[in-house]
Amino acid sequence: MSAEERTRRFPQPMCPVRAGDPCSLCIPGASGPQDCPIVQLVMDDPELRERAHELRRAARRRQG
Ligand code: SF4
């Protein structure tokens, strides 16, 4: 299976806190956004969660 086929079959999850970027497993021990401690911290804080949401919306608009 080529890398392109793998990406198509198993799409990379997007990082909820790095708007527009796929999860790059930048936090040691995280296996994706589902168990990332940074994502958990941001989502637990109402202001940070709203700001992350705004940034994701802006990134989607940029990507068209
Ligand atoms: S490990 Fe966490 S902070 Fe890093 S890219 Fe993935 S979801 Fe985002």
Image: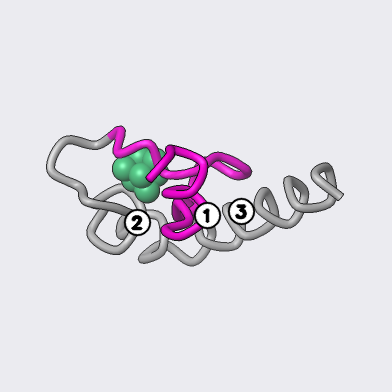
- Give the percent coordinates (x, y) of residue 8: 52, 54
Where disc 3 sits, the SS reads: helix
Residue under label 2, please give it.
33
> Across the whole image, how many numbered discs are drawn on residues?
3
Determine whether the beta carbon of the residue marked 3 sits less than 8 angstroms from the nearest atom of ligand 1: no
Which quadrant of the frame does ligand 1 lie within? top left
Task: Give the quadrant of residue 35.
Answer: bottom left
- Give the percent coordinates (x, y) of residue 38: 31, 47
Mark identifier at residue 51: 3
Q: Quadrant of the N terminus?
A: top left
| Residue drawn at point x = 38 percent, y = 36 percent | 24
| Residue drawn at point x = 50 percent, y = 43 percent | 22
Determine whether the beta carbon of the residue marked 2 sits less than 8 angstroms from the nearest atom of ligand 1: yes
Residue under label 1, please give it.
8
Task: Specify start and end residues of the magenta stretch as a single range.
Answer: 1-26
Which residue type does callout 1 highlight?
Answer: Arg
